[in-house]
Image (cartoon, rainbow, N blue to C red):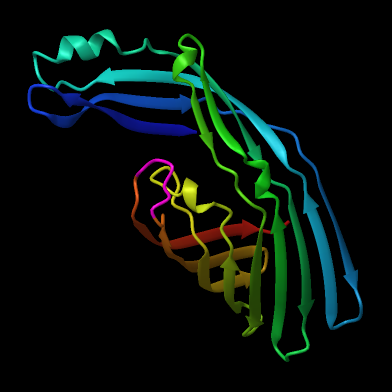
Amino acid sequence: VTLQRNNAVLNPFTQRFADAVNVYLSSDWDSGIGWNAGVLFRANETWRVGLSYRSGMDIDLKGDATFTQIPIDPRLDPLVRAGIPPNQGIRTTIPFPATTVAGIATTAVPGWDIEADVTYVTWSRFETLLVEFDRTRGIDLHRPENWKNTMSYRIGGNRRINDDWSIRLGAVYDENPQPTESVGPILPDSDRTGVSFGIGFHRGPWIVDVTDFVLHFLDRSTEGRSADNLNGTYRTDANLVSVNFGYRF
């Protein structure tokens, strides 16, 4: 995990704000332990129903905070330098949510394998982002998040063209967990819709899949309630291309 920002000060000689210190927070890699469980029920040759659960987990992270002065004015820089904290260690805990997925699949449409899923995610575990500094506890980052649990809905289909080729289509609607007050430059999340198209090639033990996934985030306004006092409207779009190579033993 990395977080980076510039802290500004008011230059008394120009009466203008200017970036004075760059703060760079970076953590090491770490891991946690969770568990998964699932069940698949085949009603007949046409219909299948499945349910899966993945537990939540907490990841404890440790890292470093680096403070770098940004020169502004020779008359002001010594005063800024005197107030910069020393570089030091940091620590935080990131809670990851539990996920429950229920799905149904059918081959009732000739030539197609179609599946629909509903996913419930317990994002409400993410109540606060707390970053603790080892030496200067007075600058600890304590950011309320208060995320909420969400639902997402997916549907996808695979059509086998012949023994070697398949095409795939998919769509998703994913609710965002973030309250309006938390929307800001760190993470301007919003509800999103996406569509995907893929091609699969299978011959003997070899597998090649290519997919394009277009994701549109609905415009998200802070509605004048930003906890960071950075009000505005955020617009995001993403396009993800993936290629998978496989060999089946």
Q: Nearer the viewer, residue 243 or 26?
A: 26
Kindly give the residue lying farthest to the bottom in the view shown.
Answer: 110
Q: Can you tell which quarter of the image residue 241 is in?
A: bottom left
Residue at left 37%, top 26%?
A: 24
Q: Is residue 113 left or right of residue 176?
A: right
Quarter of the image with the C terminus is bottom right
Q: x, y (%) of residue 199? A: 54, 74
Task: Establish if 231 lies above or below 213.
Answer: above
Q: Nearer the viewer, residue 224 or 161?
A: 224
Q: Is residue 159 left or right of residue 197?
A: right
Q: Can you tell which quarter of the image residue 10 is in?
A: top left
Q: Nearer the viewer, residue 163 or 109?
A: 109
How many marks overall?
0
Q: x, y (%) of residue 125? A: 68, 42
Q: Can you tell which quarter of the image residue 117 is in?
A: bottom right
Report if residue 228 lies within the magenta region. Answer: yes
Q: Nearer the viewer, residue 158 or 232?
A: 232
Task: Establish if 196 lies above or below 181.
Answer: below
Residue at left 65%, top 82%?
A: 160
Task: Establish if 72 lies above or below 187.
Answer: above
- Magenta highlight range: 224-229
Residue at left 58%, top 35%?
A: 128
Q: x, y (%) of residue 168? A: 59, 76
Report if residue 121 lies within the magenta region. Answer: no
Q: x, y (%) of residue 113? A: 72, 80
Q: Is residue 151 left or right of residue 78?
A: right
Secondary structure mostly taken by the magenta-highlighted segment of the chain: loop
